[in-house]
Amino acid sequence: MCPTQVLQSLFVPTCKHQSNRADLNKAVVSGGMDSPLRHWTLRCWLWNLAVALLVQWCANNDVLGSNHQSADKAPLPQPIVRAGSEAGPTVLIVAGIHGNEPAGVRAAQIIARWSVARGKLVVLSPANPPAIGRRQRTIPGAPPEEADLNRNFLVEGHECRPRGVLAREIWQHVEQIRPDWLVDLHESLRFHKDGGVGNTVIVYPRDETVSVTRKILDKINEEIAEEEEKFVVLRWPARGSLARAAGAILDCHSVLVESTRQDPITKRVAHHCHFVLALLEELQMGPTQGDS
């Protein structure tokens, strides 16, 4: 079974009335999962299986860049849009701003296959193809002041003045999309308990953004045994970051999700997917089964 088929098998129709635990257990034992049932713990287990298969597939297919293509000539990113049948919010997922952070890119490959019941799910990944192609944090060959793409979205007054060709292209996409939520996927070297920002969500601090983020993290943290490794909310993305510019200029809910390389990549990818999944469910967007 290919990774896409595994991922598609995780989704079942949404029901308006929650069934009790006995009904759920009966359905699981009998294999009768055609009924409209959802269960967070079961889905998390299935996600981990699916993500492990995807990572194995990615290892055999050079999805993060090709040695046969010059990283400096890699094409600029184009958004993938998944529109629902009803009006609703727009959620923009960005990944791969730093080229040495593969978990977000691999999670974005999963998320881009989802469909939504309403609104729009937009995926912009990889956001930094030259750095992804070289598997390095910064833009190859860029001047030192422009090398870190996530410091090139400069806010001046009521405008964002992106610095460099790639930042200008990305910002143009973001302005055209006008997201209600922007989720930027990243990785840190260390857990926040060890002096990094791993397993944090850094929010542009609007009250509703903080409230919804905490609600989502309550779900994610149920699956994390170690108390000091649970996700926490931090405020204010770095100056020059895409998340900060989007929150300040576009007046949207803007968050930066940081996993940590102290976790295996399967877990990092799963954390990113779980956050986006929980956000879409909180916004009553789905997701529903993706394309075959």
Image (cartoon, helix red, strand yellow):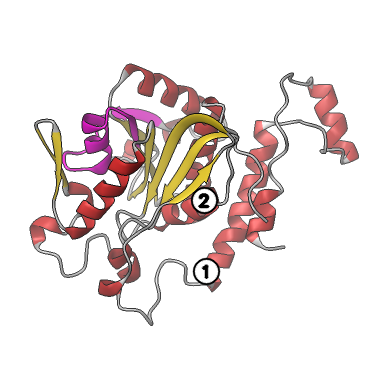
Amino acid of disc 2 = Ala
Label 2 sits on a secondary structure element that is loop
Q: Pinpoint residue 77: horizontal percent, then vertical percent.
A: 35, 59
The correct choice, above or below, for 280 with respect to 196 in the image is above
Q: Viewer-nearest of labels 2 and 1?
A: 2
Residue at the spot x=30%, y=78% of the render?
Answer: 70
Q: Secondary structure at mark 1?
A: helix
Which residue is label 1 attached to?
A: 59
In the visual, does 274 lie left or right of 12?
left
| Farthest-out residue, right | 30
Q: Position of residue 61 (x, y in %)?
A: 52, 72
The region drawn magenta spans 232-255
Residue on which disc 2 sits: 112
Where residue 46 appears, x then y in whole percent?
A: 67, 45
Q: Is residue 220 visible?
A: no
Relative to 141, residue 185 above or below = above
Disc assigned to residue 90 = none
Q: Is residue 273 left or right of residue 148?
A: right
Q: Residue at x 56, y 27 (%)?
A: 284
Which amino acid type corresponds to the residue marked 1 in the rendered image?
Answer: Ala
- The answer to which quarter of the image holds residue 209 is top left
**Is the residue marked by circle 1 packed among few (<14), some (14-19), or many (20+) residues within 10 Å?**
few
Residue 65: percent from left, percent from top: 39, 70
Q: How many marks?
A: 2
Where the C terminus falls, by quadrant? bottom right
Residue 292, compared with residue 211, is above or below; it is below
Q: CA distance from mark 2 to mark 1?
A: 19 Å
State the image quarter where residue 126 is shown.
bottom left
Residue at the location (77% across, 31% down)? Answer: 36
Q: Are marks 2 and 1 in contact (CB under 8 Å)?
A: no
